[in-house]
Amino acid sequence: MPLLSDTMTEGIIAEWHKKVGDTIKGDDVIADVETDKATMEVMPYADGTLLYIAAEKGKGVPVNGIIAIIGKPGEDFQSILAQENKSSQPAAVVTAPEAVVAPAAPQAAVSRAPLSKDASVIRMPLLSDTMTEGKIVAWHKQIGDTVKGDETIADVETDKATMEVTPYVDGTILYLGVKEGEAAKVNDIIAIVGKPGTDITPYLLDEPASPATVSSLSQVVTQPTTPVVVPATQVMQAAESNDRLKASPLARKLAEEKGLDISHIAGSGDNGRIIKRDIDQMASQPALKASMSTPAAIVQQPLSSGATYTDVPLTQMRKIIAQKLTESKNSAPHFYLSMTITMDNAIEARKSINNVSKVKVSFNDLVIKACAMALRLHPQVNSSWMGDFIRENHQINIGTAVAREDGLIVPVVRNADMKSLSQIAEEAASLIEKARTKKIVPQEFTGNTFSISNLGMMDIDEFTAIINPPDSCILAVGKITPTPVVENNSVVVRQLMKLTLSCDHRVVDGAVGARFLQTLKTYLENPVTMLA
């Protein structure tokens, strides 16, 4: 049972949309859950078969309690239930007469004040099906700021997109648990919102923490109100320990504009964070400012070869791209099939369609439609490797790779075989725009059964692509090029496009992939056949 609101302690199953034995996709809605504030949909974020339902319709389940179990057909799940029951029961006290226990040495106890109702904990939400942690790209609110429940307090970068986080509760920001640029695990505390003056220590102590963390919570540090110039030796030590400089983005910008070395300023903000006030005070004191004009320089020695370089931290998206595509390349035996398509008829058909269509149809939209139609006739290509069985997907959901500065994302056109060209064009354009502006939501980039990567608009003749799990195939599309060809003993110029299909040999054999490409070629070279 997920935590769906800040005050939720349990959820009531309003409706089950799946029953035991049903096959489940990670982005399927399996149930409607009624919380204390609204009725919301629940998705499993895991593929498999529904093996067990723990609560009937109308029954309540506490947050984090089991509501269902998904796995392989026939898999034993009793151990999971036994573990759940064991953890929910108080531990039994066993008296052993022969055992003599020496009195324990007294230990310093951590006093835990009861949690008040004057504050709410904001946790790192699960924003995608593969997300394990999120990085705080920017805080839009600071400690002491008043916030409304529907305001954006932070931008969080997941493995697939940068998304906004709202607190769903009104109040004042009392605590920020993660610095900008740093990551938190899913469900970790990232902020606390409540009434001004509320003691947040009990909320933090209620979380699993190291003794050092607990100790630090009991200390109140009073920062000086006047900025302090830090000796260069201390700056060197800080650099050597690889600590991240604590400063707000505004403070960094002001320091740069005023020509101040921010590494020589001690901050007066939370945990020594350098804020705007520190920069303003430093700039207003000529003596201190002058002492910073010639700081001791920290010189980075070049490599022995004289080469220089820049280490770029990995984004969450880049980490997952590296992980998933490495897994795909190493686990799926790839093979490649190439075919040349004559696009003259498609070019003329596109012109005619765009003369009457309200939405501009692109060549990529034609490829999506043709692939969807071909997949309908070749369901093996629309399948997924599941370990000990192959899943033949009944829906045809086509993903299109979209390049962004921080990596790739694959928006999905669902049920593409059932949509017209203009519908596909409109939906694809909307999804691509959302992807590029980082407004796309998880339901729009998950659930693909086949993928397309098109580099034709970047003047690429042909290439091979790595399969995008859980798909078993991906189609690489090159540019359309006027090329001389021989027809009926005469040389004519035709508009040719090269396609390469990457196949997972565990699912798709060479002949199956070849027949799919033959069908695809028929549709693209004679677009009118897609209307049949």
Image: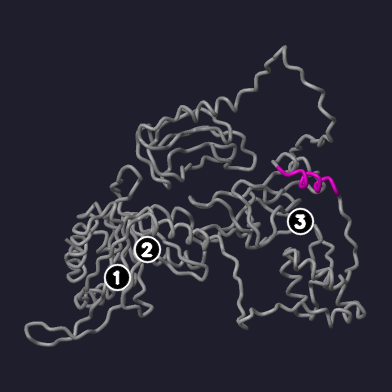
Q: Quadrant of residue 256?
A: bottom right
SS at mark 1 in the image: loop
Q: Measure how far apart labels 3 and 2 are at the Cα level.
A: 45 Å
Q: Label for residue 16?
A: none
Q: Earlier in the sequence, mark 1 or mark 2?
A: 1
Mark in the foreground, 3 or 1: 3
Front one among 106 and 281 = 106
Q: Position of residue 429 (x, y in %)?
A: 40, 67
Q: Amino acid at mark 2?
A: Ile
Residue position for label 3: 143
Q: Earlier in the sequence, mark 3 or mark 2?
A: 3
Q: Measure how far apart labels 3 and 1 are at the Cα level.
A: 52 Å
Front one among 330 and 367 = 330
SS at mark 3 in the image: loop
Front one among 476 and 255 = 476
Residue position for label 2: 466
Q: Residue furthest top?
A: 97
Q: Main secondary structure of the magenta part?
A: helix
Q: Position of residue 424 (x, y in %)?
A: 33, 63
Query: The N terminus appears in which quarter of the rendering?
Result: top right
Q: Amino acid at mark 1?
A: Ser
Q: Quadrant of residue 288?
A: bottom right
Q: Quadrant of residue 104?
A: top right
Q: Residue furthest left?
A: 488
Residue position for label 1: 357
Residue sitting at 61 percent across and 50 percent down? 185
SS at mark 2 in the image: loop
Task: Please state the extent of the stretch shown in magenta in the rendering.
Answer: 209-219
Residue sitting at 74 percent across and 59 percent down? 142
Q: Does the magenta segment cover residue 195?
A: no
Residue sitting at 65 percent across and 62 percent down? 181
Residue sitting at 82 percent across and 23 percent down? 103
